[in-house]
Image (cartoon, grey):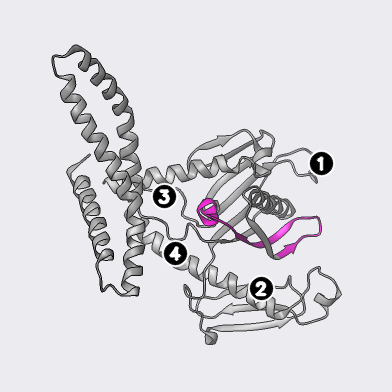
Amino acid sequence: MDAALETRLDQLVRRHAEIGEAMAASGVSGAEFAKLSKEYSELSPIVGGITELRHAQSEMSAATEMAAGDDAEMKALAEEELESLRERLPELEMRVRLSLLPKDEDDERNAILEVRAGTGGDEAALFAAELFRMYQRYAALRNWKFEMMDLSETGIGGFKEATASITGRGVFARLKFESGAHRVQRVPETEASGRIHTSAATVAVMPEAEEIDINIDDKDLRIDVYRSSGPGGQSVNTTDSAVRITHLPTGLVVIQQDEKSQHKNKARALKVLRARLYEMERQARDSARAADRRSQVGSGDRSERVRTYNFPQGRVTDHRINLTLYKIDKVMSGEALDEIVDALTAADTAERLAAAAE
């Protein structure tokens, strides 16, 4: 390891020890103790990894010295130990380097999923519906709660747009690279000549924001209520339960009409609006950081083409990492989506490691 990294590791070990001493001292206020305790718990696994690495480095040094001796038996034992340590040290070092990477503070958040039909008419809407159900099945496989928030359907079972709230452990971390344009290539059922058509749908995955994260001023909102036009039964269609909220400073518009209660629709619309505003802030932060990096696995921009689903060839290709899987049925059922997500996460980690080393 380079000298700069060694110095950084020494600083972290010292800081961990200092915090431990400070927490043990008398006269520490409750608020200060809570602050120190949080930092101590964050540093503990990092320092644990450093300690394990340093111990292995010490063993390596001792075994190297022993291998240089004259005792044949001890030399053989030392060579065996060295072989084991040569395999183990890179793994320990990588673990320490990974622990030093800045964490995405939003990774553990729940998420708001939005899927919209893009170019391609009815076929695009049908594909949007399939994508939405893919994420619904994926959520079920991971024991996440998937709650429909808003749905605009076409007459033939397609979705013009659909919104859902996904709740569970590490939801945003697993889904954040899904944002962007998803393209489908296949022969539509309505195509008599058997020609392959290309259609698209866009996906947005946004970390769910709390009120403390985004302060929305009432004077910045225009709230309109009207009768729901969608399916849902007489009580939905005969009361002014649908809500449209316009955020005047940004021009963002959120419509909610799935619930029979105006109050519930308003609460849901504010939840989506808060997520969109938080995502705008996040994008601005990420763009500023990305300007200093050579590349990004995914910008989260809806216009970025991220994946192609080719049904005639049974393949799914993620263009950001040039990954192709010939198991489209398992991807669409949610079963093989983890393979893509894991590869994207690994690529992002590799890029961040490379950036940190520069």
Camera-nearest label, 1 or 3: 3
Please tell me whether mark 4 sits on a helix, a strand or a loop: helix
- In the image, 65 versus 122, the foreground residue is 65
Viewer can see residue 137: yes
Among numbered discs 3 and 2, the one appearing first in the sequence: 2
Position of residue 43 measured from the top left corner of the image (x, y, whole percent): 32, 55
**C-alpha distance separating marks 3 and 2:** 32 Å
**C-alpha distance separating marks 4 and 2:** 23 Å
- Disc 2 packing (10 Å; few <14; some 14–19; many ≥20): many
**What residue would you read off at disc 4?**
282
**What residue would you read off at disc 3?**
296
Quadrant in the rendering for residue 171: bottom right
Q: Residue at x 70, y 60 (%)?
A: 160
Question: Which residues fall within the magenta stretch?
Answer: 151-176
Camera-nearest label, 2 or 1: 2
Residue 326 position (above or below residue 272): above
Viewer can see residue 293: no
Q: Residue at x 34, y 74 (%)?
A: 31
Residue 255: which numbered mark, if any? 2
Among numbered discs 4 and 2, the one appearing first in the sequence: 2
Confirm whether the magenta stretch covers residue 4: no
**What residue would you read off at disc 1?**
192
Q: Amino acid at mark 1?
A: Ala
Among numbered discs 1 and 4, the one appearing first in the sequence: 1
Among numbered discs 2 and 1, the one appearing first in the sequence: 1
- Disc 4 packing (10 Å; few <14; some 14–19; many ≥20): some
**C-alpha distance separating marks 1 and 4:** 46 Å
Q: Amino acid at mark 2?
A: Ile
